Image (cartoon, rainbow, N blue to C red):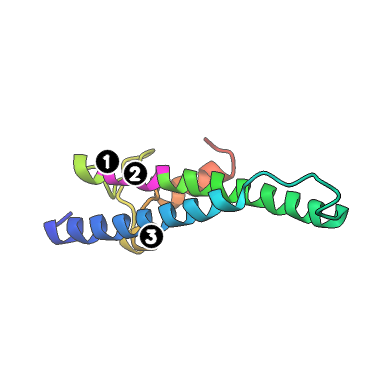
Amino acid sequence: MSPQETVRFRELIAAQLAQVELDLTEAGANAGTVMLDQSSVGRLSRMDAMQQQAMAASQRTALQRRQQQLQAALKRLENGSFGACCQCGEGIALPRLLADPGTPFCADCREARERGGD
């Protein structure tokens, strides 16, 4: 990978990490405790609030996973293994990396993992 590509991917990953951190902050605010006092909130409103809280918690988990993927991609960028599949070692296609710089697998290995082949 050329120095220009390294800089490009470092900037792309940093921008995505910054967005994930903003989204995590928002998801944390939406996952607050649900008010259970029936005198101030009706039953259906509480159920809606609990559903929204569960969705925010699920979103937070997905965002944390994405944050870990991007941090791992930065580490691979620093140690020179970025762009190589973490399973087979082959190069990951540039369009795939541009679409998702956090991806650790080439398309073939990812497909095999999704099928349960590994």
Q: Secondary structure at mark 1?
A: helix
Q: CA distance from mark 2 to mark 3?
A: 18 Å
Q: Bounds of the magenta span?
A: 68-76
Q: CA distance from mark 1 to mark 3?
A: 18 Å
Dot 3: few (<14), some (14–19), or many (≥20) neighbours within 10 Å?
Answer: some
Of the residues shown, which amino acid type is indicated by label 2? Answer: Gln
How far across and how far down the image is residue 103, in percent?
40, 50
Residue at left 24%, top 46%? 77
Of the residues shown, which amino acid type is indicated by label 1? Answer: Lys
Q: CA distance from mark 1 to mark 2?
A: 6 Å
Q: Which residue is mark 2?
A: 71
Q: Which residue is mark 3?
A: 96
Q: Quadrant of residue 5?
A: bottom left
Q: Nearer the viewer, residue 62 or 112?
A: 62
- In which quadrant is the N terminus drawn? bottom left
Q: Which residue is mark 1?
A: 75
